[in-house]
Amino acid sequence: VDEPAVHISEFWYEQTMGPLRLRAGAIDLTVDLDGNAVANSANEQFLSPGFVNNLAMEFPAGSGPGLAVAVAPGAGFELALGAAEADADWSQVLTRPFLAAQLSQSSAIGGRGGSRRVYAWRNSLPHHDLRVDDRGDEPGYGFGLSFDQALAGSIAVFARVARQREAVYTLGSSWSAGMQATLPRLGRVEQTVGAALGRNHATSPWARLYKTETEGAECSDELHYEIYDSFRVHERLAITVDLQRLDNPDGDSAAHRVWVPGLRLQYSR
């Protein structure tokens, strides 16, 4: 039987000094990196991790010791730098860091707000080189883009794309795109709908290994779809009905298509 324990998801201190913002403690760097106004919250938007953040970005394993610094020089630009322990277990704070930098720009196009972000990262945890059997202490790294834009009415769209080091990952690149719309209010009920699709592409080294291990089977791209309908029936209560579909799960073209229905209840005080 596991011993009783207290789990703290985040614990940090933040200070703002003019255009400079500093946050330190047990932090979650997904708050500062790869953000998106349409697809970035499993509590209010899409449920799938593939639409909350890009899967081709190896964030730290949890909320570990870290530091985030952001400076906004003006004209809608912001430069954010993040550093945290890669495995978030508080044992190798300085020797196994996750490092990232992101440049973002927010502005109105046609009178409607939107943001564009470009970022790069490096994860220092030991990774096995898929091309060489005895090379197991390689770092991971990659880069990506994230975009969101409000359109006519209450419609907004998003897109993400990222790529990571092929030699050490089974997933080489991933992209996703979708939309969100707030429907006309029915009495006191607020209703928001969303739809998204994504594609995950395997790396060449993994595709070769997969073909060898499966005696000739090809590794296929994984396709992911999600739709949701969220009702705010009270200022404190929201109900979301969700449906996901997964084709070629884990890149296995012989695997059956997977359907995942979901129901989310969120109560806010």
Image (tube, rainbow, N blue to C red):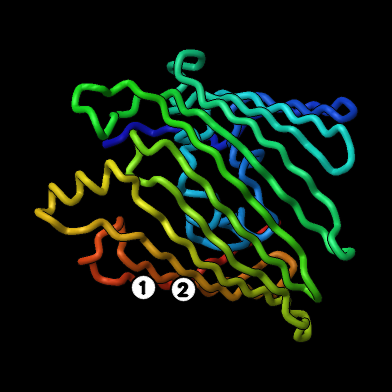
Task: Out of 13 and 38, give the one closest to the viewer.
Answer: 38
Q: Quadrant of the N terminus?
A: top left
- How dense is the environment of label 1, judged by Cα within 10 Å: few (below 14), some, or many (20 and up)? few
Task: Name the residue: 68% across, 45% down.
Answer: 117
Task: Name the residue: 62% across, 61% down.
Answer: 44
Label 2 vs 1, first from the N-terminus: 2
- Residue 255 to residue 127: above or below: below
Mark 2 is on which residue type? Leu
Q: Are marks 2 and 1 in contact (CB under 8 Å)?
A: yes
- Whole-percent x and y of residue 135? 25, 22
Mark 1 is on which residue type? Trp
Q: Residue furthest left?
A: 215
Task: Name the residue: 35% across, 60% down.
Answer: 221
Q: Quadrant of the C terminus?
A: bottom right
Identify the residue under disc 2.
Answer: 243
- Distance from disc 2 to disc 1, alpha carbons, whole Å, reads 7 Å
